[in-house]
Image (cartoon, grey):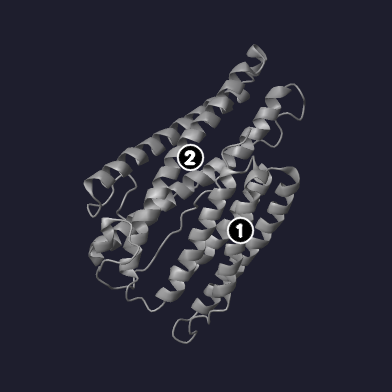
Amino acid sequence: MKLTIKLIALAFVVSFAACKGSGDKKDGAKTEYAESNKDDANDIVEYNNVLVSYTDKNNDYLKSLDGTLQKISKGLENPTDRFAWIGITSPMSMISINHSKVKPETPPAALSSDDQKFFKDNVAGLSSTMTKIKDTYKALNDYIKAEDWKDDKSAKGKLLVDSIYSMSKKYYAYDDKILAKLEVIGDDAERIILKSHPLKEYIFALKDDKKAVDDFNKLLAENAGKYKAAEAKIKTAYAALEAQNAKHKIMSPPDAKKFPGQDGSFTRFNESFSDYLIEARKIMRDASASGKISDDDGESLVRKQDYMRTAYNNFVD
């Protein structure tokens, strides 16, 4: 058993510190924040960035934990084997350096009272669940170090592993809710900040690309175990992704003299999108034959999407 594969909505950091603008209502706006002033919009975007960085750190820990738990589970099945506990290392928890005064648990006053409560409640739930996961893993690690599996034939160890998996699903439920809300709120705030940005045409193109990939990943995740039933819909969505990538690849890159390095960053994002499509095509072919998307294939696609995120962030930073 593995931790839930995060095929859905990897969040993207946004950085438009040099932008100026004031808020006019935009077509397609989803929230009241489309009418925010530039200061409120910047506060919302800063909170978005802090919260994304915080969840990224947690998700990196859970990815590392997943590999460790798989090895431990195998060891608990045959703990007396001399190779049972070789190569098991504790998951890495990266130190998060936050230079902003904004904290994940303290949403800005620019948000409505309902949205402030939403983030306070869900961030608290997210943080509490992560703390419980780490505490349970410590108990599991102590159990193995003390060789307590000799007393109960691995019974408690297996229960601890199952408990971590269960709590991880709860964590990801909070994570999905938070990132989905950020996607809606942040988009309107970003558009205010981007109103007079000289590269807004490119940034909107990249934003549209990453949103389309998020939606495609969600479609795959929803049908990972029943691929054939949704194959026609998935192929149609994939064709739309290819067309979108082709359209943006032929855009003339930003003027290198006016925006040094941005031409290369724009090209690298489009290349990372193309690499994602190549991986998706291979996975779709395999899933068509097997009837499902494997965990390994899902993780491979997540890595390709993560490269897109890095390329996007390099462009907007």
Q: Mark 1 to mark 2: distance in Å? A: 28 Å
Nearest the viewer among 285 and 100 is 285
Whole-percent x and y of residue 19? Answer: 32, 73
Residue at x 38%, y 79% (from the top left corner): 198
Residue at x 54%, y 73% (from the top left corner): 248
Mark 2 surroundings within 10 Å by alpha-carbon count, few (fewer than 14), some (14 through 19), many (20 or more): some
Above or below, comparing residue 26 to residue 298 in the picture: below
Can residue 271 be seen in this snapshot? yes
- Which mark is drawn over residue 266? none
- Image side of residue 51 versus residue 229, left or right: left
Numbered disc total: 2
Residue at x 37%, y 54% (from the top left corner): 184
Q: Quadrant of residue 229?
A: top right
Q: Split into 4 quadrants, where in the image is the C terminus?
A: bottom left
Q: Secondary structure at mark 2?
A: helix
Whole-percent x and y of residue 315? Answer: 48, 70
- Which mark is drawn over residue 172? 2
N-term mark: 1 or 2: 2
**What's under tag 2, amino acid-wise?**
Tyr
Q: Which residue is mark 1?
A: 236
Nearest the viewer among 157 and 19 is 19
Above or below, comparing residue 258 to residue 165 in the picture: below
**What's under tag 1, amino acid-wise?**
Thr
